[in-house]
Amino acid sequence: MGKLFGTDGVRGISGTEFTPEMALRLGRAIGAFYGPGSRVLVGRDVRAGGDMIANAVISGLLSEGVKVYYVGMIPTPALQLAVKRGPYEGGVMVTASHNPPEYNGIKVMGPEGVELSREEERVVEEYYFSNHASKLEWRSLTYSVEVRHGIIEEYVDTIVGHVDRDSIAKLGARVVVDCANSVSSLSTPTLLRKLGVKTLSINCHLDPEFPGREPEPTPDTLKEAAALVASAGALLGVGHDGDADRAIFVDDRGVVHWGDRSAALLSYHASQRWDAPKRVFTGVSSSTLVEEYLRPKGIEVVWTAVGSVLLARTLWKEGGIAAFEENGGFILSPHQHVRDGAMKLALMLDLIAAEGVKPSELFSRLPRYISKKTKVKATREEAACAVEGVKELFAGYRQITIDGVKVFGEDFWMLVRPSGTEPVVRIMAEALSEERLNEVVNKAMEIVQRCKGGRQ
């Protein structure tokens, strides 16, 4: 049987890899998984071909006797919250999240709003690769698509209800929001207005070509937002990805911070606000600063393999206050067990209001490392060879080997792992000095090149 789902959903280039024929076939497979009579909520982001794919998926669902409810363009976490609240057996989001504009894709979720487990994905794949197609009696095909309204408004109101709105409003703050020309434009400016915050927005008009920047929020893609924060004297800046389940922050000095830094601060704040197990889950790609900051405060840090679906389901099953990734994804357990960029933003403003300090002061409380991220083209065998070589070279150090190998040193950490989405080996590292950083990364690169037989 072939492989369809990647790290988070199914993705491909619109019109060539992700065609309406494929979407129809996938819609039938998803419909067979849910079963006749099931209620499924469908939404999409702004990407080119979104209507084409959504309508093809809806046709597939209807052909399997599924009741379809359509909400149109919506942030992924807003759709997930609506699915969680019911009355739905599942949801389908047409999105490629942070991928470049030419991509589109599909995320599939269960009745709790969380993306399907790996085992459930395999069931859908079995239906897909066997070309499953039910032959239902015509009386079973009488459902029409029902359009749902007001879901984004309910989602925003729910987030506002989780934080101290009055204290946030008293800040009199200005916040820069970069919506990446996608569906966070429909939610985040409204959220900020309801929180009493003055909003400076860029790239907040919907455009499937993403003219403002690439959909993934990073220090490079958020340079314009960072410059605006500094020049306008704003308190905070935030950048979302294409489907609004991530948030990367810019502090009041115009410095962009990776998601694990903000998540460490937010996890401790959340642990003081809600009665939940003092535990967080994070992928091995996060910085060791998470441990250094949270463990002395009595919060257990559990490392997992990379992937938001695994994080969400682990948090849901084992219990904790939060789960997060360095890429900006943050899951707040008292809210919902999925990444939510708007909720993360509201919680950051709640923290700032509670502490009465600027974001730059909050971030200054964290250990400061120099970081480097790179990748090298490699087959799966070459990547596995590199992982084993790093394990051997750093055998005397603490290691985590659940996803590649993460090495912990006194003045550095390094992760070497095969990518789950492309034929490369990823190298991530942080150190207290640039000299030490280059030393450990160069050692890993030498091992990768040996495994590749000297090929670049």
Image: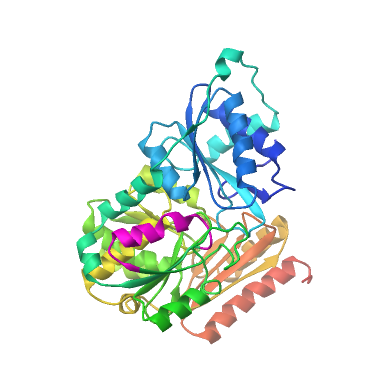
Compared to 68, does 334 lie above or below? below
Which residue: 43% across, 49% down?
A: 77
Which color mode does the image show? rainbow
Residue 140: say if magenta.
Answer: no
Examine the image and state in which quarter residue 321 appears. Answer: bottom left
Magenta residues? 180-198
Left-right relation of 158 to 52: left
Compared to 143, does 149 lie above or below? below
Q: Position of residue 441 (x, y in %)?
A: 60, 76
Q: Position of residue 136 (x, y in %)?
A: 61, 16
Q: Position of residue 420 (x, y in %)?
A: 61, 54
Quarter of the figure that contains the N terminus: top right
Residue closest to the eye, 437 or 391: 437
Residue closest to the eye, 189 or 268: 189
Which residue: 73% across, 71% down?
A: 449
Compared to 72, does 215 lie above or below? below
- Asked if residue 369 can be seen in this view, the reply is no
Residue closest to the eye, 176 or 238: 176
Examine the image and state in which quarter residue 259 appears. Answer: bottom left
